[in-house]
Structures are given as C-alpha cells and as structure tokens.
Amino acid sequence: MRKLLVIALVGLAAQLVDGALGMAYGLTSSTLLLLVGVAPAAASASVHLAEIGTTLAAGTAHWRFGNVDWRVVTRIAIPGAVGAFAGATFLSSLSTEAAAPWMAAILFTLGAYLLVRFSRPLRRNPAAGQLRGRFLGPLGLVAGFVDATGGGGWGPVATPALLVSGRMEPRKVIGSVDTSEFLVAVSASLGFLIGLGTEGFLLPIVLALLIGGLIAAPIAAWLVRIVPAQMLGAAVGGVIVLTNARILMRTAELEGSLPVLVYVLLAAGWVTALVLAVRLVLRARRQRATAEAASLQAANTEAVNTDKANAEAVNADKANTDKAGTDDADSGAAAEPEVTALSGADR
C-alpha cells in the first residue's frame, strides 16, 4: 500500500509537469518508477497503459477548445504508432539487466535535452506554409520508438520540432501532439502485450498512476498560471538527469571519487540551467511590462488627442454659432432704415 501511494504521487507529479509543459509525463513517470525499483519494461508498459486514459482525456479537451490540427495528427500519429510498437517489441526482448542502462541512457539524454531546451529561448522560424508529410512521418516514427523504449519521449521529441518549424500556433502544436499520443500509447501497449503478456502490466501501478493523474489535472491548470514553464522545465530536466546518472554510473562501475565528480559537474550544469531559465523569465517579464507601459501610454496619448480634437470641434461650432448670430443682427439693422425710408415716401 505504501508503494502504491508513492506511485500515485508519481502520477500526480508527472501530470503536474505535463500539464504545465505539455510534455514529460512519460519521462517523469518512468524515471520515478525506475527509482522505486520497477523493472524497465514493466515501467514503460504500465506508463503507456495509463497514458491511454490520460491522452484520451487530454485529446478530447484540446479538440473541444479547437487546439487540434487533424491533418498533422493523422500524418504524425500513424508513423508514431509504428515506431512505438517497434520500440515496445524491442524493449520487451531485452533482459532487465540489459534494458535498465538502455532506458536510463535514453532518459538521461532527454533530461539533458530538457535542460538545454528550457535554459534558452525558442527560436521560431517565420516561414509560412504547411508541414509536409516527409517531415512529419520520420518525426513520428523516431518519437514513437524513443517513447516506447525510453518510457517517455513523445512530447519532448515531437513538440519542440513542431514549434521550431514556426508553421503552427503553439497551442495547436501541443494539442495535436497530445491528441496523436493516444494512438501511440495504444500501439505501445499492444506491443508490450505481445512481448510481455498480461503479466507485463502492473495493474495496481497503472491504476495508481491514473488516479494520481486525474487528481493533478485541475491542479496543473492552476499551476501553469503560477509557475513559469521555463523554470519548471529546467527543474524537471535536472531531476531526470541526476536520477538516471546514478543508474548509468552503477552500470559503468565507477569507483572512488569519480561518481562524486560526475554529480558535482551535473549539479553545476543544473544550477546553470536554472539561472539561465530565471534570467529568461525575468527578461520576458520586463519586456511584457515595457510593452504594456508603451501600450498604456499610446492609449493615453490617443485619448488626449481625441479630447483635444473634440474640444477644438466644440470651439469651432461655438465660433460659427456666434458668427451666424452677428450676421443676423447686422442684416436686421440694415433692413430697418430701408423700411423707414419707404414709409416716408408713401406719405
């Protein structure tokens, strides 16, 4: 029961991260499951089975909010499903001893990628046009294979690649990737079912992950407004790197002061990434404040100019009215002597 409670907390934490970043549910869940002693193939199989429920809910929500580009979904989900099935079959064929370092290496690489990704701004390419199938197909195939063999990676591989292309809105990138992940999770689960049988799925772990994720879903919606994604991504990347570095060093049988030196270097890199992420957040806030101040100043200037123009228009109307009154008075004064003269002549 204690282990299931821990795993439920794992699912909760993973959903918090995924809800705030749009990625890393599988990465976080698999890393923490390995940390508590779950076998690599069973960890990936259980995570993907739980993801069938979470991705279905996420995809439905994105669809209702109009965040899904179905053309991209169909072109990336099918190759992704093929890659996920192949990855699940490959991981199922490995022994636990061989799979642990393989999975840890993939997770370590993706964690390092998160550190780099969220410690610098994302450069967008303003090129117009639709994404082509020859780009989406290989991307889905690679992302699906990495996702199944590493226990996660669909979002960290697919989402940044689509964002960098600059040809989709960020909300549609996240919505399309999350929606297509449903088919990837189903395909990976089928691959694990064929390779491992039903005993490969730890149903209590699946239920615990699912319950934790459902509890965290509304909290994640609030968290994304409070915690900057830049800082959260760097923090999660560091946790994944340090956790999987322990498995890799144990496999490499490093002794003496080398593990300590490796941990120090990795910790220094993590701190550097966090500092850079904080600087990016502060710079973004300053730019936002400057833009808001400029917008407010422009609005105030426009209001002053409008008031001035209205005042000038009122003064002009008043001047025209006064001039019209003066002209009428002059006309009346000129007409009165003429009437008087006519009256004298008549007499």
Image (spheres, helix red, strand yellow):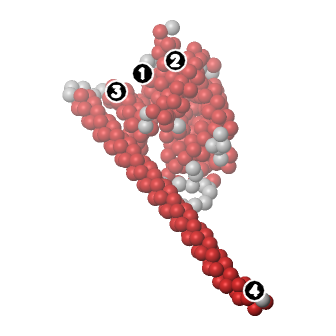
Q: Residue furthest right?
A: 346
Q: Which residue is mark 1?
A: 35
Q: Residue furthest front?
A: 347
Q: Which quadrant of the figure has residue 317? A: bottom right
Q: CA distance from mark 1 to mark 2?
A: 14 Å
Q: Earlier in the sequence, mark 3 or mark 1?
A: 1
In the rendered structure, the answer to whether residue 304 lies left or right of residue 48 reads left
Tell me the element at label 4: helix
**Number of the front mark, 4 or 1:** 4
| Residue under pointer 4 | 343
Name the mark on residue 311. none
Q: Residue at x 63, y 53 (%)?
A: 133
Residue 169 x %, y %? 57, 50
Q: Which residue is mark 2?
A: 8
Q: Around disc 3, counting alpha carbons within 10 Å, would you say few (fewer than 14), some (14 to 19), or many (20 or more)?
A: some
Q: Amino acid at mark 3?
A: Arg
Residue type (three-letter) at the residue carrying disc 4 = Ser
Disc 3 target residue: 246
10 Å neighbourhood of mark 2: few (<14), some, or many (≥20)?
many
Q: Residue furthest top?
A: 1
Mark 1 or 2: in front is 2
Q: As drawn, is 192 to the left or to the right of 104?
A: right
- Figure check: 342 above or below 139: below
Residue type indicated by callout 2 = Ala
Secondary structure under the numbered disc 1 in the rendered image: helix
Q: Residue at image x 65%, y 47%? A: 69
* Mark 3 or mark 4: whose residue is earlier in sequence: 3
Q: Mark 3 and mark 4: span between their CA atoms?
A: 123 Å
**Image quarter of the C terminus:** bottom right
